[in-house]
Image: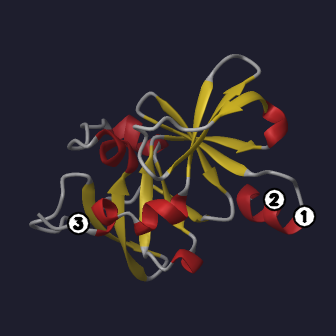
Amino acid sequence: MRLQSARSTGVMASWLAVEVDKLRLLLPLSHAGEIFAWTAPQKVPYTQGWFLGVANLRGGLSGVADLAAFIAGRSPRARSEAELAQCRLVMLNPLLETNCALLVDRLTGLRTLDAFASSESPGAQAPEYFGHLYTDMNGAHWQEINLQTLSQTPGFIAIGI
């Protein structure tokens, strides 16, 4: 609701701030879609470990990817029921033409550029979907994720094993 409200009232929020594992991530609002409470997806055989399956979100089937597992290149970690209650599924904006939701561990609000003291370009070894690395006023680091680039990354599109 606040995401939709921020878009319609002209609030200058640039990112949806989320946490996955121990990473703090910034998802551009223009790339993010609707946010859903955790819904257990139906497993799909012969897919990558980070691809959790498909879920019925607002009457349509959407793929569900564990963002932390994808970034780390590993299988998802087990989460307790209490942890899953805090998790959210962030849909990619329909304009990105990727019918997918990203599992995030926690939403931490909306952020504007004013929330950060500095930024730096991603390193040469960073994945192509990494944007700038921001440092907030408390010294915490936030990695921007370009969801448009992520949605077009061959390793993300190819869910089959």
Amino acid beneath label 3: Ile
Tag 2 secondary structure: helix
Q: Which mark is residue 159?
A: 3
At a point 61% along the width and 38% down the height, the residue shown is 121
> What residue did someone put label 1 on?
9
Residue 16, percent from left and from top: 65, 49
User: Dividing the picture into quarters, in which one does residue 75 lie?
Assistant: top left
Q: Is residue 91 visible?
A: no
Amino acid beneath label 2: Ala
Mark 2 / mark 3, whichever is N-terminal = 2
Q: How is the image coloured?
A: secondary structure
Label 2 to label 1: alpha-carbon separation: 5 Å
Tag 3 secondary structure: loop
Tell me, yes or no, whether the two marked residues, 2 and 1, touch with CB atoms within 8 Å.
Answer: yes
Left or right of 96: which side holds 62? Answer: left
> What residue did someone put label 2 on?
6
At a point 69% along the width and 32% down the height, the residue shown is 119
